[in-house]
């Protein structure tokens, strides 16, 4: 048995520098030690590691290499592999910035042309190089206004240097640019005086700098003075020495000063220089000039020269020679003239000569006032315009003329006299509180007036005589005046206006003051208040009383029969009668509200009371009538009607009956004071039976009416309406036949058939019922059970009382279609509708309904409408055409069939349409066709006759006029 061992080489699977991906950048400070560790994995045999800096292989004696056996994972059938690690230590310098460090794996299974490598790049942080300045050399001379460009540069450094410019220690520019490891900051400026001896410094630094690196230069700038200034007096008298000083602005080198006085150069003038804080030097020179006579002014010139730059600046100074003005004089006002207040007064003051011309100033009572100045070559005039008022009276106006040559101003004065009215007048009263029965004094005081004001009193515009008109000195040289007025105080003086007038008679101007007297007194009710008031029931009633008192804050209390009436402010809102101050408000008047109401008015001075009597008028209503007065024929009957109402007069109750032709001849009326009216009817007959109408109206509310029945005893009268003459029932059903009559006394009923009395309520075949409908009408119903053919036919009903009897023969038939209605009538017409009524016929023993047929008179086409509900006997046909004639008919129908339509006899014409038309009911007696035709014929005839008469009258008048002309 032979065992064969196979050894083969396996290349590494990977290579890496731990914690640093391939081609990554490692940032490290200069001279700071750090480590790189390279690891090659899964090689067989173990790989060898080689380090490079750039492309140069490194021989590092203190490197740490290690090989580690890597066993196969469980379940894998492969041989042992090896991981190799190599760790080196570095301490980089500035030269290592941008350097590449590479780790390479060498193995027999790797091709030399395709080495396995990984590389990292170093970024070494180190301080920048020393900065240097370009663009200016120390000691070089620059002129003011020249453009200067200073460039600061620094080489090296990671990161590149930050460059900052400073001028005399103050930062002036931070912006800089970099290119690779070179930084540059360019500062461009225009040189001025402040740049002379200015120190420009550039500082370079980065994060590795312990302190900034510096470079600096000191500039030298030449400049001439910007100006020269002459200081000294601008005015002087003849012969005065005038000290003058000329000072230059800063200059480098120092400027020289030259003087010219009155066109002549001043020699041997001294000067001195001093350092300017703004750079350069300031030169100062002093001279003294003497003012010569016969000159108005002296001109001085100062020159400042920078000899190095050959530049010259000049300043001129003028000295005026002073002479005093002449004495001023005032014109425009004559002493002693009285000027009315409110007028405009112009006063002028003039002064001549002087150098300079005089300054003119006006004063009023030593207070300076504004003036208008007018100047000529040789004089000045100051004019004041015064709107005169009270303060100008005895006011002292002073005009002053002065210039630089006068030590004390020259002046002239006037004193004005002004007439002025009093500004106000005031009234005082004594005592301050006025009550009836005392004597009071009104005192009128006017303000100051010139001449003194004249006082007068007025009451409500009417003059009254005052007392003690006195005067005393007042403001502004005027006089104040006073006058009294005595009054005996009464309530009637409250509210009376007294006026005091103060008149300046010279000016015809006056002022006024008025006082309204306030007399304290208890409330007094106005005499115009009504004591007796009438209201209408169910209407609101508001009573407002007038009461006058002072103070006017009056409290009112309302009572009735000693009980207080609720006030509106405290009411619950449910009260019908409330009060609010002097107003009594009854929201809905009742007849029970009549009576006496008391209003008490109270203020701090006392109280007053007023009684108001309220009478309530309410509509007359009928409260009772005589019930069913029954009399025998030819007897007298008396009907009564009792009425309640306010007011009630004899004519408040009337009686009426339309179907009683001899009403006035056969009746008489009596009236008692209890509101009852009695109607007496003489010799009554059967025809007088019926209702008389009691009518009451007292002018308030609606008319009240009530029927009073008069019953005259008479024999029975049986109702023979169509629906009470025929009845129907089917065989086997129960039949009912009704017999109805009117009688007084009420009738008794008996039934028979074929002459044989019917025994009702005994055999079980026939039953009768009795019912009283009203005081005159009653009915009896015959009930036939299990109707057979033998039960059909006529029956006799007898209605009987003490005065006689009446009979009727109703008929029982088999149920059938209904009979047609009867008496179709038109009861009302409008522009688009017609109201029809009819009398129902026999219903055939079943519930009947109706159908109306109608058409236009000039058309053959019918329209139909079913009457709904079916039990009515009046119906409105709508949507008709205006001013159109129509024909109407009606039929009845039930479940068994229909009746025939009535003949087309009912006709009507709709009215013409008008927005303000009032529809009227047409009387029944004019609604029949032939009646309408007769009316039309008669109307046309009458109109024709009237037209003929009118034509005849016109012709007659024309003939008369013609006859007169002929005569």
Image: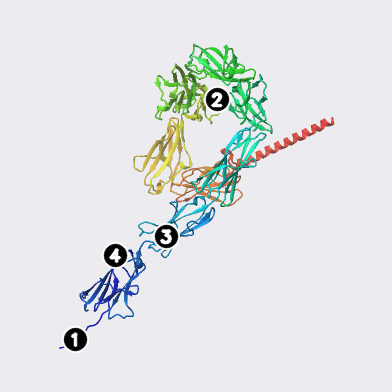
Query: Mark 4 or 3, which is nearer the eye?
Result: 3
User: Which residue is disc 1 drawn over?
Assistant: 4
Question: Considering the numbered disc 1 on the image, is that residue within a helix, a strand or a loop?
Answer: loop
User: Would you say the residues marked 3 and 1 are in contact, meaning their CB atoms lie under 8 Å apart?
Assistant: no
User: Which residue is disc 4 drawn over?
Assistant: 33
> Whole-percent x and y of residue 648?
49, 22
Query: Mark 3 or 1, which is nearer the eye?
Result: 3
Q: CA distance from mark 3 to mark 1?
A: 76 Å
Q: Please tell me which of labels 1 and 2 falls first in the chain.
A: 1
Of all residues, the one furthest to the bottom in this rendering is 1
Question: Considering the numbered disc 2 on the image, is that residue within a helix, a strand or a loop?
Answer: helix
Question: Considering the numbered disc 3 on the image, is that residue within a helix, a strand or a loop?
Answer: loop
Query: Is 951 placed left or right of 507 in the picture?
Result: right
User: Which residue is disc 3 drawn over?
Assistant: 131
User: Which residue is disc 2 drawn over?
Assistant: 664
User: Would you say the residues marked 1 and 2 are in contact, meaning their CB atoms lie under 8 Å apart?
Assistant: no
């Amino acid at each position: 048995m032979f065992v064969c061992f196979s050894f083969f080489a396996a290349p590494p699977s990977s290579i890496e520098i731990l914690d640093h991906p391939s081609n990554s950048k490692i940032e490290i400070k200069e001279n700071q030690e750090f480590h790189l560790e390279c690891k090659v994995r899964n090689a067989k045999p173990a790989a060898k590691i080689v380090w490079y800096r750039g492309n140069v292989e490194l021989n590092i004696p203190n490197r740490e290499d290690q090989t580690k056996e890597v066993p196969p994972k469980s379940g894998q059938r492969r041989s042992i592999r090896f991981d190799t690690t190599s760790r080196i230590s570095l301490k980089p310098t500035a030269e290592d910035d941008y350097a590449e460090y590479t780790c390479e794996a060498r193995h027999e299974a790797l091709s030399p042309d395709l080495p396995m490598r990984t590389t990292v790049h170093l970024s070494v942080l180190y301080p920048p190089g020393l900065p240097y300045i370009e663009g200016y050399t120390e000691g070089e001379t620059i002129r003011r206004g020249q453009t200067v460009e200073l460039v600061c540069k620094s080489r090296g450094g990671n990161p590149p240097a930050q460059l900052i410019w400073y001028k005399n220690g103050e930062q002036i520019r931070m912006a800089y640019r970099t290119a690779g490891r070179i930084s540059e900051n360019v500062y461009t400026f225009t040189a001025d005086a402040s740049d002379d001896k200015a120190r420009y410094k550039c500082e370079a630094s980065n994060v590795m700098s312990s302190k900034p690196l510096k470079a600096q230069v000191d500039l030298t700038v030449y400049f001439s003075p910007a100006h020269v200034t002459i200081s000294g007096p601008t005015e002087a008298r003849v012969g005065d020495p005038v000290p003058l000083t000329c000072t230059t602005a800063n200059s480098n080198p120092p400027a020289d000063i030259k003087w010219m006085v009155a066109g002549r150069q001043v020699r041997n003038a001294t000067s001195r220089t001093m350092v300017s804080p703004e750079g350069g030097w300031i030169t100062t020179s002093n001279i003294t000039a003497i003012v010569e006579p016969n000159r108005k002014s002296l001109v001085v010139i100062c020159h400042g020269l920078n000899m190095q730059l050959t530049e010259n600046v000049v300043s001129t100074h003028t000295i005026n020679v002073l002479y005093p003005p002449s004495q001023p004089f005032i014109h425009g006002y004559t002493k002693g003239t009285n000027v009315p207040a409110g007028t405009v007064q112009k006063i002028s003051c003039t002064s001549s000569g002087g150098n300079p011309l005089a300054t003119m100033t006006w004063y009023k009572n030593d207070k300076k006032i504004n003036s208008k100045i007018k100047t000529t070559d040789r004089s000045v005039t100051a004019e004041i315009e015064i709107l005169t008022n009270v303060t100008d009276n005895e006011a002292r106006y002073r005009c002053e003329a002065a210039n630089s040559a006068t030590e004390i101003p020259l002046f002239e004065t006037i004193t004005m006299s002004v007439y002025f009215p009093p500004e106000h007048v005031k009234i005082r009263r004594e005592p301050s509180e006025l009550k009836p029965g005392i004597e009071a004094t009104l005192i009128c005081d006017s303000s100051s007036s010139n001449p003194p004001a004249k006082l007068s009193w007025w009451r409500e515009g009417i003059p009254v005589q005052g007392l003690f008109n006195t005067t005393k000195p007042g403001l502004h040289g005027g006089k104040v005046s006073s006058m009294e007025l005595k009054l005996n105080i009464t309530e009637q003086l409250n509210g009376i206006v007294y006026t005091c007038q103060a008149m300046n008679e010279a000016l015809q101007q006056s002022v006024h003051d008025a006082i309204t007297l306030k007399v304290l007194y208890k409330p007094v009710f106005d005499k115009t208040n009504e004591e007796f008031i009438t209201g209408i029931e169910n209407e609101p009633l508001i009573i407002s009383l007038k009461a006058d008192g002072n103070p006017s804050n009056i409290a009112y209390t309302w009572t009735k029969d000693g009980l207080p009436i609720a006030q509106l402010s405290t009411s619950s809102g449910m009260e019908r009668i409330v009060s609010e101050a002097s107003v009594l408000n009854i929201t809905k008047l009742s007849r029970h509200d009549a009576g006496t109401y008391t209003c008490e008015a109270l203020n701090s001075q006392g109280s007053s009371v007023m009684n108001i009597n309220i009478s309530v008028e309410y509509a007359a209503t009928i409260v009772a009538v005589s019930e069913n007065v029954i009399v025998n024929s030819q007897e007298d009957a008396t009907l009564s009607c009792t009425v309640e109402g306010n007011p009630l007069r004899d004519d408040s109750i009337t009686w009426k009956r339309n179907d009683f032709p001899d009403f006035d001849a056969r009746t008489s009326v009596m009236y008692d004071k209890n509101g009852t009216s009695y109607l007496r009817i003489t010799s009554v007959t059967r025809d007088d039976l019926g209702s008389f109408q009691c009518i009451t109206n007292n002018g308030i509310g609606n008319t009240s009416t009530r029927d009073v029945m008069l019953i005259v005893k008479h024999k029975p009268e049986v109702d023979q309406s169509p629906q009470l003459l025929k009845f129907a029932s089917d065989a086997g059903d129960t039949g009912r036949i009704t017999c109805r009559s009117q009688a007084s006394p009420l009738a008794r009923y008996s039934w028979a058939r074929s002459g044989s009395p019917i025994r009702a309520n005994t055999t079980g075949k026939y039953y009768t019922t009795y019912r009283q409908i009203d005081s005159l009408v009653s009915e009896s119903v015959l009930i036939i059970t299990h109707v057979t053919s033998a039960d059909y036919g006529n029956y006799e009903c007898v209605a009987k009382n003490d005065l006689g009897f009446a009979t009727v023969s109703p008929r029982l038939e088999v149920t059938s279609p209904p009979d047609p209605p009867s008496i179709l009538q038109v009861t009302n017409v409008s522009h688009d509708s017609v109201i029809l009524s009819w009398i129902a016929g026999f219903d055939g023993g079943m519930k009947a309904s109706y159908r109306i047929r109608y058409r236009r008179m000039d058309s053959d086409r019918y329209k139909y409408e079913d009457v709904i509900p079916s039990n009515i006997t009046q119906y409105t046909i709508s949507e008709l055409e205006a001013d159109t004639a129509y024909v109407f008919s009606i039929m009845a129908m039930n479940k068994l069939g229909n009746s025939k339509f009535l003949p087309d006899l009912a006709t009507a014409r709709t009215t013409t349409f008008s927005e303000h038309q009032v529809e009227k009911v047409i009387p029944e007696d004019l609604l029949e066709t032939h009646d309408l035709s007769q009316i039309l014929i008669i109307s046309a005839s009458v109109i024709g006759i009237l037209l003929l008469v009118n034509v005849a009258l016109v012709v007659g008048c024309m003939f008369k006029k013609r006859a007169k002309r002929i005569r």
